[in-house]
Image: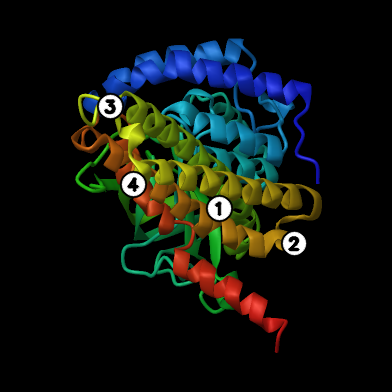
Amino acid sequence: MNFELSPEIQATLTKMRRFVEDEVYPLEAAFLYEGFHSILPDLEKKRAEVKELGLWAPGHPKDLGGMGLGLVDLGLVSEVLGASPLGHFVFGSQAPDAGNIEVLHQYGTAEQKARWLHRLIAGEIRSCFSMTEPGMPGSNPVMMETTAVLEGEDYVINGRKWYTTAADGAAVAIVMAVTHPDEAPHRRASMILVPTDTPGFRLVRNLQVMGESGEGFFSHGEIAYEDCRVPRGNLLGPEGQGFVIAQQRLGPGRIHHCMRWLGICRRAFDLMCRRVVERAASPTHTLSDKEILQAWIAESKAEIDAARMLTLHTAWTIERHGWKEAREAISEIKFLVANTMLRVLDRALQVHGGLGMIDDTPIAWFYRHERAARIYDGPDEVHKLSLARRILKSYR
């Protein structure tokens, strides 16, 4: 394994980091206090500048307008962009669009790609991914109540989804629905494309996440599918293969998440270090003189570096041997990096005191929205149990 960066990716990361710090950070205050829609015109200007710099859509194929980066390089990019809540959106690399684009590119028909894929990559429209249901355990995704019944040449979809990220303002949803109820659990569901202006698609509400409902891209929607009828041609991939496709999407997706979380770690760590050096604790001392804070800084640095190396190793394994060979490591990084991020955020918030509780820094926003990192894409407990079973199997 050699994680030495090529001169090209090093230059790319430097350009991106400079742009995020100089052009994106200044937009955060308005975003945190006034919301997504208030700064959307400014965000669109920044997106246009990113395209001019040749830094748009780093993970998507070059022939479709992206940069075509591999998984390790894309993970490093995600770390840089993750330092700001706005980073991935400005560079056309945001979830859930990034994962939806991968699925459409691999499984979409020519008609589906012509209608949705190119516009998604260009950032002209947004999408959402409708899988989680309020009445079903997210830790067991094969349990699903939403159905898509074939009537003639149409699917008729009925059910309710929630935590559908970025549904507010999305043009199309990829919906997981049961099409083959009598098959084995992992072969019951299919993915179906549903334009959000289809009769029967209803955005019930934006969920209030720790008191904040959000808006536009920065929201999580509850959606009712009520006799929602779409053509059979909207089937994405083979029938009954929804969970197989989802697993292929989630494996590499966890690299993006973990490296984004590490970007958050770096930002929180930087803010914490600056704070302890600048903040007076007495007329003659700053917070940096406190040994307990020195220990927090040392522990945070070591934890971030360890989590980063394991994540890069996992990305390297997926890139060379496929996601199945990296299953144990994928589980490891999912709970390890999430908990590392939350510890670092908690320390940074504590160091900032009252300032850390309000939105004058991005710490409180990260703290609110990233607590869910231990829940989505499989809760910690599921990943730990799965990992332990695989380890113990070799001892029996």
Q: Crowdedness of circle 3 by 10 Å Cα count: few (<14), some, many (20+)?
A: some
Marks 4 and 1 sit apart, C-alpha to C-alpha, by: 48 Å
- Secondary structure beneath label 3: loop
Q: Earlier in the sequence, mark 3 or mark 4?
A: 3
- Indicate left or right for 185 with 135 as reference: right
- Secondary structure beneath label 1: helix
Mark 3 or 4: in front is 3
Q: Earlier in the sequence, mark 4 or mark 2?
A: 2
Q: What residue is rendered at 53% in x and 24% in y?
A: 91
> What count of labels does the image hold?
4
The amino acid type found where label 4 is placed reads Asp
Name the image quarter holding residue 65: top right
Q: Earlier in the sequence, mark 3 or mark 2?
A: 3
Instruction: Say which mark, if any, is on residue 325.
Output: 2
- Indicate left or right for 95 with 315 as reference: left
* Above/below status of 106 relative to 123: below
Mark 3 or 1: in front is 3
Residue tagged 3? 279
Position in image of residue 212 (x %, y %):
22, 41
Position in image of residue 324 (x %, y %):
72, 62
Q: Quick one: 311 or 140, which is closer to the camera?
A: 311
Q: Residue furthest bottom?
A: 396
